[in-house]
Image (cartoon, rainbow, N blue to C red):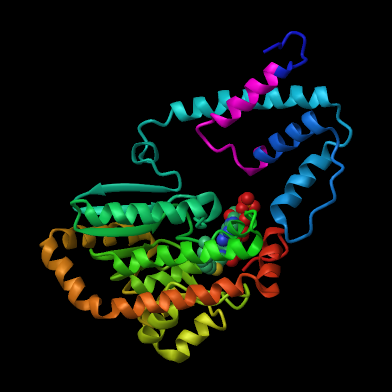
Amino acid sequence: MNRTAMRASQKDFENAMNQVKLLKKDPGNEVKLKLYALYKQATEGPCNMPKPGVFDLINKAKWDAWNTLGSLPKETARQNYVDLASSLSSSLESSSQVEPGTDRKSTGYETLMVTSEDGITKITLNRPAKKNAINVEMYHEIMRALKAASKDDSSITVLTGNGDYYSSGNDLTNFTDIPPGGVEEKAKNSAILLREFVGCFIDFPKPLIAMVNGPAVGISVTILGLFDAVYASDRATFHTPFSHLGQSPEGCSSYTFLKIMGPAKATEMLVFGKKLTAGEACAQGLVTEVFPDSTFQKEVWTRLKAFAKLPPNAMRISKEVIRNREKEKLHAVNAEECSVLQERWLSDECMNAVVNFLSRKSKL
Ligand SMILES: CCCCCC/C=C/C(=O)SCCNC(=O)CCNC(=O)[C@H](O)C(C)(C)COP(=O)(O)OP(=O)(O)OC[C@H]1O[C@@H](n2cnc3c(N)ncnc32)[C@H](O)[C@@H]1OP(=O)(O)O
C-alpha cells in the first residue's frame, strides 16, 4: 500500500476490496454501509441517484450513507476505503486470534453457544446485546443445533438465553433485507424459514426443556408450547404482542395455547398481547415451575442433571407416546399459521410497526 504518498492507487483499492471479501468476521452493518458508500464515491463520484422509498429500508440506508459523503473527491474516498479495509482486517483478524478456545469457535456457531456435558446438550441464545433477538442466522443455527442434539449421545436438550433476556423474539431487522424479488419474495422466504424452524421443534425426539432466564417475547414464547418442560426465573415475563405488530400467532400457539390454557386466556395473550408474569404463566400451564432468580440456575441444573441420568431410550419412547398422535396436526397448524403470516407481513399494519421500531419510534 502506498502509505507514504497517502494516495491509494487503483491496485491498492483492488487489494482492499479483496481484503474486505476475505474478512472472517462480519464487521457489522454500520461499517458495511461505510464501505459501500466509500466504494460508490470512489468509483462513481457523488450520489445522484433518486432517494429510495421509505419501505425500501436497505436501499434507503445505502443511499443515505453514500449521499452523506457529499462532494468528497474520488481519490480521497478511495484512500479512505483502503484505510478502513486495512484497519478492519487487522482488528477483526486479531480479535479472532484471541478466541480459539471459546465455545463459539469450537462449535462453529456465531449466534449460539452449544455445549454437551453430563448427558445434557445446552443451546444458549447468544446475542445478549440485542436481547437475543433471533436473526436469520440464529434461526438456521438453532435448527442445526437441534438436528445435531437429536443425534448426539446426550439424553436431554436445554434451550436458554445469555444475558438479561431469554429472547426478544424475531429480530425485526430480518424484514429489512429485501431480495431482488421485492417484499413478496421476502415474505415467502420468511414463511418457508419459519415453517422449517417450527417443524424442527415439532419433530425433536428427545425431552426438550426451556430454561427461561428472563423476559421472553414473540416466537420465543409461542414455541414453548412445543417443549416438554419450561422452567422460569421469577424475572421472566411472557409476551406475544402480535396484534401490536400487525402480525398473527405462530409456533403452533394458535393450537397449543388453546389446549394449555383454554381459549379465553389464550386470546388475552395472542390477540390482546397481554404480558404474563412467570407466576401467571405457571398458573396457566405454560410454565412448569418458577424459581427465585437468585437460585434459578442452581436449582434447575440440579434437577436437569438428575433427569439426564434416567434411561435415555425410555425417555425418548415416552415422549413419542405422549406427542406422536399430535404431530400431524401440529404440522398442519404450522403450515396454516405460516401462510397467514406471509400475507400479514405485507400489510401496512405490519410494515408500519417494523418501521416504527427500527426508526426508534416504538418499543413494546
Ligand atoms: C423469518 C421470520 C420469522 C418471523 C417469525 C414471527 C415472529 C414474531 C415475533 O417474534 S414478534 C416479536 C418481535 N419482537 C419485538 O417486537 C421486540 C422488539 N424489541 C423491543 O421492543 C425492545 O427492544 C425490548 C422491550 C425487547 C427491550 O427494550 P430495552 O430493554 O429498552 O432494550 P433496547 O430496546 O435498547 O434493546 C437493546 C438492543 O437490542 C435491539 N433489539 C431488541 N429486540 C430486538 C428485536 N426483536 N429485533 C431487533 N433488534 C432488537 C435494540 O434495537 C437495541 O439495539 P441497539 O443497541 O439500539 O443497536
**Residue 281 image point, x, y percent:** 41, 78
**Residue 197 image point, x, y percent:** 41, 63
* Residue 20 included in the magenta stretch of the image: yes
* Residue 1 included in the magenta stretch of the image: no
- Residues 43 and 243: in front is 43
Residue found 37% across the figure and 82% down from its top: 283
Residue found 60% across the figure and 78% down from its top: 243
**Residue 153 image point, x, y percent:** 18, 51
Magenta segment boundaries in residue numbering: 11-31
Quadrant occupied by the N terminus: top right
Going by the image, does 331 lie left or right of 139?
left
Magenta residues, dominant SS class: helix
Residue found 66% across the figure and 22% down from its top: 14
Going by the image, does 338 lie left or right of 32?
left
- Residues 134 and 50: in front is 50
Please indicate, yes or no, whether residue 313 appears anywhere in the rendered image: yes
Ligand 1 falls in quadrant: bottom right
User: Hey, which residue is sitting farthest right in the picture?
Assistant: 71
User: Hey, which residue is sitting farthest front in the picture?
Assistant: 181
* 169, above or below 148, in the image: below
Quadrant occupied by the C terminus: bottom right
- Residues 35 and 284: in front is 35
Going by the image, does 336 lie left or right of 5?
left
Q: In the rendered picture of this protein, how many numbered marks are placed on residues?
A: 0
Q: Quadrant of residue 329?
A: bottom left
**Residue 285 image point, x, y percent:** 35, 81
Residue found 70% across the figure and 63% down from its top: 355
Please indicate, yes or no, whether residue 169 appears anywhere in the rendered image: no
Going by the image, does 132 lie left or right of 354?
left
